[in-house]
Image (cartoon, rainbow, N blue to C red):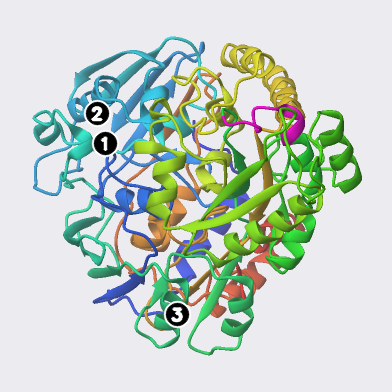
Amino acid sequence: MKPKRRSIAILLIALLCTFAVPAYSAEPVKELKLGISKDENWLNPYTYVTGSPGLDLVNLIYDTLFILDESNKPVPWLVKDFSVSDDGKQYKLVLHDNVKWQDGKPLTSDDVKFTYEYLVAHNKSRFTKPVKAIKSIQTPDAATVIMELNQPEPDFFIQPLADLPILPKHIWSTISNPDQATEHLGSGPYLLEEYKQGQYYKFKSNPNYFKGIPPIENMVLPIIEDPTALFTALKAGQLDAVSRSVSPELAKEFENNPNIKLMRGPGFSTTMLQFNSEKFPLTDIKVREAISLAIDPQYLVDTVLLGYGATGSPGFIHPDSPYYNKAVTHKTDLEKAKSTLEQAGYKDIDNDGMREAPDGKKVELVNLVYSNSPTRIRTAEIISDWLKSIGLNVKVRPMDSTTVDSLVWPEFDVTKGRNYDMAIWSWSSTMQLFPARITELFHSNLEIGNTNIGAFKSKEFDKLADQLKITLEPEERSQLINKMQEQIAAENPIVPLYYEEVTNAFNPSKYGGWLFQDGKGIINKLSFITGDETKEAVAANQPAPAATSTSNQSEPAKSTSSGQETPNVNTGKGSNALVTLLVILVVIAGGGYWLRRTKTQNKGKNL
């Protein structure tokens, strides 16, 4: 279904497309150096390591059927036309007819069908569960895919359609052990030209990309784990941008650097204190409650983040989400924390200031944290002091990220167990994109709770999650999600600490085509594709909810410019000429358009 627009809106869009002139020349960037802080392994859907920037880099090589726009709404990508049946069980997708794999072979409906069926046969936790919602896939011709679902899925457009990269059948059909695969040929805007483990990645543009020639000819991504070295290289001009969010202290310094621009916006990554609910005494709900009561998230935001963030919600879901339960609030009460432990039998028997368990044994816990994250280390140290004040001995143990991952989430498979007490952990922004993902985080059935890294078990939560799975009516779903948040807050499998604001730094003289995606920042696929026309096409094509019969037509975008813009001082998304034009259009269009523009200005603010 094409989005409904009033005639004045159509006029405004036409005028913008006609007169808006990027401040940069249309010449492509010969080489861009983007520093990343972690080796992301081979970049394919089975072997990448983290959601950000790992999967973001995968998506430069591969394409998805839909894509998330700057506001995280799913819009067509490989798909040019689609419809959904009235009962929400059938999705008919028509692919663009000019898409080719990077080896020149055409991408067809057979590749889509193969990818979805391959994920069922070869498990990958992020993708397999959503794919299992599909009952059958038909491919009546090379461009058409018809998916029949077992039942309507409210989030199907987001996951899997806008999340799962499509694999080339002619390559992956011969791969029987995908977790060890080094294949990296896709249909995306960039080809992975070279990967040197622990050192760098090299990309080159795909001249045959169906959305147009990418604006950057070559990209070099050096792997620099030490944050000081990473940002020093940016300041010295050795890097053009970095994937890591700038720390609050450094942001102040960068604001005064004429060679560096900052883009800032809301961050959806969730930093938390993660408990291993299988490990005594964290098996005791009273111990987890006491730890939660001892923590002051607002102090962490004010002191560690210098105010650049939002306090964690005890129910996990971000406060900006429409599903956020405002009634679920965090309480900090050291005296109540002490009395809770006392009543549960944890007493200081030998008067050394630290409590013993009810059986008389010493309570000694270790909190794991990434050694390359000063922010998390400082957070862990402050929490350790708070817990010491209530009589719990918790030591902070910084370790390299790979080691921490192997202890908390061995092989990224929750069925492999775990070997830790607690950890300062963070889930990337994708976990907040739709609220039903808390089922994956906390359901005790590990086939459902495939990211339940704390082995949390709650019959009450499972019951609510199972009910949510079969509930489609929006109001009923909202009520269930509210109750699920209340259950998480009551049982404390985690203590959400904060959602750190994303602040990205880059050299605007080298490349200015960055697009800030809510919750993630500038490292997203839309920042690396040919400019305004493609990006405006993305913004103009939004699918309707799955519960109604829908259709949508998305025309392929032309590639007539590099899309490089100088970030505007107010929004980070336009040139000064564009601002002037908007003022004129506001006069023509009236106050309604101004309100819409004002809403846009709150995102991706340029410092």
Mostly what secondary structure, the magenta segment? loop
Q: Residue at x 70, y 29 (%)?
A: 488
Q: Which residue was labeled with disc 1?
A: 166
Where's residue 356, x and y in %?
A: 74, 38
Task: Return the residue at label 3.
Answer: 508
Q: CA distance from mark 2 to mark 3?
A: 38 Å
Question: How many neighbours does mark 3 have within 10 angstroms: few (below 14), some (14-19), or many (20 or more)?
Answer: many
Q: Disc 2 and disc 1: Cα gap in Å?
A: 6 Å
The amino acid beneath tag 3 is Pro
Q: Residue at 24% of width from left, 23% of height from top?
A: 113
Residue 495 higher or lower than 451, as above or below = below
Q: Residues within 10 Å of mark 1 (few under 14, many from 20)?
A: many
User: Is 338 colored magenta in this rendering?
Assistant: no
Give the quadrant of residue 62: top left
- Total labels: the figure holds 3
Horizontal relation, residue 28 to residue 434: left or right: left
Instruction: Judge depth for marks 2 and 3 and give the one in front.
Output: 2
- Depth check: 99 or 495 in front? 495
First along the sequence among labels 2 and 1: 2
Amino acid at pointer 2: Thr
Q: Earlier in the sequence, mark 2 or mark 3?
A: 2
Vertical side of 215 occupied by 412: above or below = above
For mark 2, give the secondary structure: helix
Q: Position of residue 102 (x, y in %)?
A: 14, 49
Q: Marks 1 and 2: in contact by CB < 8 Å? A: yes
Name the residue rendered at 58%, 40% in the picture. 432
Please name the amino acid that badge 1 sits on: Ile
Left or right: where 248 falls relative to 512: right
Q: Specify start and end residues of the magenta stretch as a single range.
A: 279-288
Q: Which mark is residue 115?
A: 2
Which secondary structure lies at badge 1?
loop
The image shows residue 77 at horizontal and vertical percentages of 36, 42
